């Protein structure tokens, strides 16, 4: 089996993998060793199933991984014997801006620059644009995510953890308005955000796409590109276990 390895450091466990497999830039699967940042980088650059492994370092949560570096012998044995399954995690999202498509794993983010940023929200359905709210939202901005990114920035911003597939979620960031609750729409539709006043920065997974001023807009929709994860039946971490691990990792010792 050929594998691709992405790692944020030269771990001894990564070297053990290299000595056990044929390592190639175009492997059958990608082993991503590190935290959520490494996982996102792998998901953006590798077009195939990903096996995330937590590095266990402070601040490195590795939410999507069932395994840590201490499981490396288990990983090597089961990969060699092909005792694993491929699970569809969910589709990525697409940010449409100035005629270009930017694929994101976690979220599209609109954030204010100096002042607050004011914007209106629309739903695009069957080629037509409809207002979702009949007023302008003003504040630090908003982020749009799907199932994959709902446990990242979205969760820390007070957005919901999404367990149901094929939805897109809009979460507001410190906004003023009659309603501040997140919005979830069917993934067959698109969201459009248009700047009404001031300026904002548009980012895709933390990478700046551009600056938007009054009248500028962008759309977000669910991508057709899927994100697949390598899973081992013997080592599955339940949602409650993941959330407990996240909470414990942030406790002051």
Image (cartoon, helix red, strand yellow):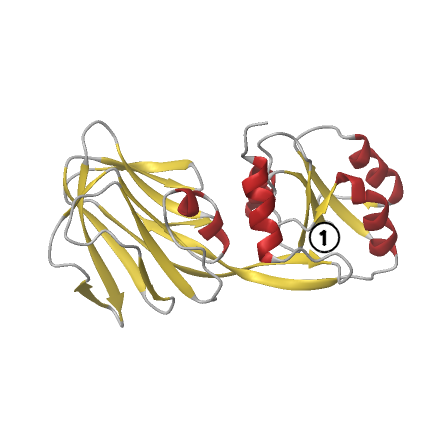
In the picture of the structure, the residue carrying the numbered disc 1 is: 29
Q: Residues within 10 Å of mark 1 (few under 14, many from 20)?
A: many
Q: Nearer the viewer, residue 25 or 237?
A: 237
**Residue pictured at 24% horizontal, 63% vertical:** 123
**Residue pictured at 68% horizontal, 35% vertical:** 56
Q: Element under label 1?
A: strand
- x and y percent of residue 85 in the render? 73, 64
Q: Quadrant of residue 211?
A: top left
Q: Quadrant of residue 24?
A: top right
Do we see residue 99 in this rendering?
A: no
Residue 183, above or below 142: below
Judge from the rendering whether residue 22 lies leftward or rightward of residue 216; answer left or right: right
- x and y percent of residue 142 in the render? 29, 45
- x and y percent of residue 86 in the render? 69, 63
Residue 108, above or below 200: below
The residue most toward the front is 253
Q: Nearer the viewer, residue 60 or 128?
A: 60
Do we see residue 238 in this rendering?
A: yes
Judge from the rendering whether residue 21 lies leftward or rightward of residue 61; answer left or right: right
**Residue pictured at 40% horizontal, 47% vertical:** 154
Q: Which quarter of the rendered picture does the C terminus lie within?
A: top right
Q: Nearer the viewer, residue 81 or 3?
A: 81
């Amino acid at each position: 089996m050929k594998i691709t390895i992405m790692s944020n450091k030269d771990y001894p466990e990564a070297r053990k993998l290299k000595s056990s497999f044929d390592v190639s830039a175009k492997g059958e699967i990608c082993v991503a060793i590190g935290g959520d940042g490494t996982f996102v980088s792998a998901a953006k650059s590798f077009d195939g199933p990903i096996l995330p492994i937590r590095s266990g370092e402070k601040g490195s949560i590795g939410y999507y991984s069932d395994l840590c570096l201490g499981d490396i012998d288990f990983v090597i044995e089961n990969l060699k014997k092909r005792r694993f399954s491929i699970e569809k995690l969910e589709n990525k999202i697409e940010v449409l801006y100035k005629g270009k498509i930017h694929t994101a794993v976690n979220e599209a983010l609109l954030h204010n620059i100096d002042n607050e940023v004011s914007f209106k929200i629309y739903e695009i359905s069957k080629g037509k644009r409809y207002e979702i709210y009949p007023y302008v939202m003003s504040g630090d901005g908003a982020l749009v995510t799907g199932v994959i990114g709902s446990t990242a920035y979205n969760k820390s911003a007070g957005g919901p953890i999404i367990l149901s597939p094929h939805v897109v979620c809009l979460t507001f960031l410190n906004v003023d308005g009659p309603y501040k609750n997140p919005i979830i729409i069917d993934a067959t539709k698109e969201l459009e955000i248009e700047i009404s006043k001031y300026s904002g920065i548009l980012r895709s997974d933390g990478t700046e796409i551009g600056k938007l001023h009054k009248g500028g807009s962008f759309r977000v929709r669910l991508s057709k590109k899927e994100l697949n994860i390598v899973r081992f039946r013997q080592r599955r971490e339940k949602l409650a276990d993941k959330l407990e691990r996240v909470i414990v990792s942030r406790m002051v010792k």
